[in-house]
Amino acid sequence: MLYRPALDTALEEAMTVNDPTSSIGTVAYEATIADLQAAMEAGTLTAEALTMACLERIAALNRAGPCLNALIEVSRAALETAIALDQERAIHGPRSPLHGIPIVLKDNIDTLDDTATTAGSLALLGSRPASEATVAARLRAAGAVILGKANLSEWANFRSTTSSSGWSARGGQARNPYVLTRSPCGSSSGSAIAVAASLCVAAIGTETDGSISCPSALCGVVGIKPTVGLTSRAGVIPISSTQDTVGPHARCVADAATVLGIIAGLDPRDPATAAAAGHARPDYRSCLQADALRGARIGVLRSDRFASFGRHVERAFTTALMVMREAGAHVVDPVTLPDEVLSFNDAELTVLIYEFKAMLNRYLASRVPDPQASVSAPRSLAELIDFNEQHADQELRFFGQELLMRAAAAGDLDDPAYQQALTASRDASRQALDTLLYEQQLDALVAPATGLAWPIDLIGGDRYPGGSSSLAARAGYPMVTVPAGMAFGLPIAINFIGTAWSEPMLIRLAYAFEQATRLRQPPTYRQRIEGDD
């Protein structure tokens, strides 16, 4: 039986949203990849049943029930793919740990299936990708079932400084599954929401600065932001050649590590991956060591900027540090870095503006017109700006496109202003982080990820309290986000940050912390928190 949108009404009536024991989608609820694979190997579960369970949860929770708006589009080929994978397993065995596992892709990752790739914008409905993203192809080759495309902050949140995270013209406003009136953060909003709500088993997001980390933190899931070059960006709608990276969201560190091993590796389509030679691993599950905190040297990154996260985050962070000490870690507290290295600033913005213009123009020119489309897709950044102006009632209803316009006015990448900004942003961050780790003989840094989720405000935009993602983002270095508590029913998280190619160490530390605390809680789909109007 194929998934049909007509199921929506029946499933909405049948689904008890806050009851994980509901007959709708029970098999997909909070299960790990290892558990699901064991059940499929034992013959008590099939990829078909698992995929159907996810599709049923999507039907009940995405546009119905709490209306999470986590997914823009569902692939009608997903169930047929799952059935074929079951047949293959019976004959040849599983291809990989992801054989038959339903996964969602952020809607800036190119696919050649029955779903569009649009970065959430109506403008790209008039064209199709010329080829599939390398990460999507690797997931398919591993036997994953690609369910569809996740909603996101349109253009990966590089359109306006007053945007609402998780809003796109195609997908509408994505909602935090813990408290529906609160922001899910972005730009990989739908990917994190879908994992948190068990609409899929894992998801793929992208990060330029905080776009995996922040949604993971606010939606109570694990996120891995890899070193730039560990995973291919080929076929991913770009912002920055020096900061963009692709990574997983999952409900536990083990699942995120499993997915990372599938998508990591060299790719001739992305020259940045050449640096991953000798660093990329085909399997990160060997890093899942519950005692990894014992003897580890962890620096506690302190900054006055983190005060805006609030006392509840500070309390959870203090408890997290106590857990690390009790687990045998040597906690060096505090360690500090200059604010200009820690924060998103003019130098980083300049880098992103210049690189966005160059990379997006190249990407848009590579797409293939869709002869059946009712709109003509833009072939350049200038044409994209014109499209938005012509469709302002849909695209510019809540906020503008001043970042697109600034990028269009920028020079080329040989402009001295760009080169100077790159030195001040990427190179200074790398030097500061590497020097600190070396001088203090640290395995990693730890910091609170961000504050509590703020109320959604489409008109006024995000009330973002800041985060600790910029250091790793500007350097192009890895970071793992892991749940660290709750306050008012909202998740709190911490970030483990390391030097280039230190994913194995960060996964070890994050896994050991997760196993020592087990602080993640499933979402509750509440309408508001106490004190909200």
Image (spheres, rainbow, N blue to C red):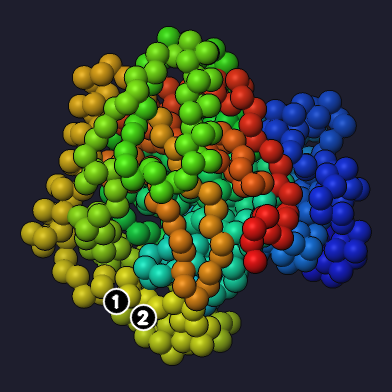
In this picture, residue 315 sits left or right of residue 434: right
Q: Nearer the viewer, mark 2 or mark 1?
A: 1
Circle 2/circle 1 CB separation < 8 Å:
yes
Which residue corresponds to mark 1? 405
Residue 326 image offset from top left, x and y in percent? 52, 13
In this picture, residue 246 sits left or right of residue 220: left
Residue in the image at 41% along x and 34% along y: 447
Residue in the image at 65% along x and 35% along y: 520
Which element is circle 2 on? helix
Packing grade of label 1 (10 A; few <14, some 14-19, many >=20) is: some
In this picture, residue 492 sits left or right of residue 24: left
Can you tell which quarter of the image residue 49 is in? top right
Residue 507 image offset from top left, x and y in percent? 49, 26
Residue 117 is at least partly visible in this image: no
Foreground residue among 13 and 457: 457
In this picture, residue 168 sits left or right of residue 360: right
Residue 437 image offset from top left, x and y in percent? 27, 24
Which element is circle 1 on? helix
Packing grade of label 2 (10 A; few <14, some 14-19, many >=20) is: some
User: Is tag 2's residue or tag 1's residue first in the polypeptide sequence?
Assistant: 2
Q: Which mark is residue 385?
A: 2
Q: Which mark is residue 94?
A: none
Q: Residue furthest bottom?
A: 390
Q: Quadrant of the N terminus?
A: bottom right
Residue in the image at 69% along x and 38% along y: 521
Amino acid type, label 2 = Ile
Q: Residue furthest left?
A: 416
Residue 123 position (above or below residue 25):
below
Query: Gap in Å between the C-alphas at discs 2 and 1?
Result: 7 Å
Amino acid type, label 1 = Met
Foreground residue among 131 and 402: 402
Residue in the image at 67% along x and 51% along y: 178
